[in-house]
Amino acid sequence: MIFGPLEKQSLLYEMAHISDKGYSEGLPCDVGNPKYFHLEDVFDGVGSQLVG
Amino acid sequence: MRAPFFAYVHLFAPHEPYRPRTEFENRFKDNWKPVPKPESRFSDGHTNAALLSRRTNYDEYVANVDAEFGRLINSLTEKGILDDSIVVVTSDHGQLFERGVHGHSTPDLFDPVIHVPLLISVPGQTARQDVYSPTNHIDLLPTLLHLTGQEIPAWCAGKVLPGLGGVEDPERALYSVEAKTNSAFASLSTVTVAIRRDNHKLIHYTGYGFEPRFELYDMEADPEELIDLYPSAPSFAPKLRDELLASLKYANRLWKSNYTSGLNFVFTLS
């Protein structure tokens, strides 16, 4: 109840400041939630999890 | 030496919205035209031109994801992770861009929705091998157990995949089910069920506000599913139909008259 809304606000702040450079049609996102991402970051994250 | 690990990675991309990096845009604008198909009963009214545009955009996004996946595989190869790892790439659904329908939230069970990619690499594999035998996601568990030298439990419904230790079985029946609008706590009454055996695919629609109906396609002679053979009553159709209906009845066996509501069902299980 306390940390959830704070975390959501933090996420929304991050989303508002993420660069869309390289994505002329806009950033990829989750259609149901305001979660925007760079594809390369997603795959880098998966790779680091598997290698680490 | 690293400990054995199992990683299940569910990526949102290439789900909608299709937003590839700029360098992947316009890669598939080559004047290709899809085969014209009749309107689905569940058509959203999308025009063919709109569907082609979205399909092209989808292809661009898939190409972008594919390139990123290649980068990931290269990285895992360089780190030696793939020397002792099995990699499985698949999807939980496909996507329709035809018959007035876009997406997969449709009761239609045409192949673009259910014929999904399945790529498997095993340690020591040096060459690509293509297997065209119809299969099902339920085959992944026994296949992985087989590849890792584990015992396959008797309750396991799937089979080891051909090409990875299993054998092809043209007599095997494979099922697909679409029941998103059906309550999870009630028998399957608004549902589409497809049974595939060898090259024949029978689709059954029931509970959608029109008379329950069957459609039958020869997937080898008619892979675009344009010619419904069911009205011509081929000799093998009744057996396939009875098998499908018996399976549906079996799936509904838990819901007897006293389990009519979700609450009853939950208490019964407790």
Image (cartoon, helix red, strand yellow):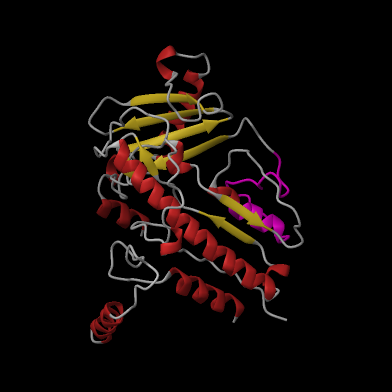
Is A33 on the left-hand or right-hand side of B78?
A: left
Above or below, B18 relative to A15:
above
Quarter of the figure with the C terminus of chain B: bottom left
Image coordinates of residue A17 in percent, x first then y, are 29, 81
Image coordinates of residue B59 in percent, x first then y, are 44, 51
Q: Is residue B162 visible?
A: yes
Q: Is residue B262 magenta?
A: no
The quarter of the displayed image where residue B231 is located: top left
Is B68 on the left-hand or right-hand side of B100?
A: right
Is B19 on the left-hand or right-hand side of B141?
A: left
The quarter of the displayed image where residue B152 is located: bottom right
Above or below, B199 relative to A43:
above
Above or below, B120 relative to B251:
below
Q: Is residue B104 visible?
A: no
Which of B96 and B263 lies nearest the eye of the viewer?
A: B96
Q: Which residues are magenta?
A: B140-167
Image coordinates of residue A7 in percent, x first then y, are 29, 83
Residue positioned 28% across, 70% down in the render: A34
Quarter of the figure with the N terminus of chain B: bottom right
| Total residue callouts | 0
Image coordinates of residue B177 in percent, x first then y, are 41, 41
Give the main secondary structure of the magenta stretch.
loop
Residue positioned 55% across, 49% down in the render: B138
Residue positioned 62% across, 73% down in the render: B75
Above or below, B119 relative to B249:
below
Which of A28 and B171 lies nearest the eye of the viewer?
A: A28
Which of B77 and A4 lies nearest the eye of the viewer?
A: B77
The quarter of the displayed image where residue B98 is located: top left
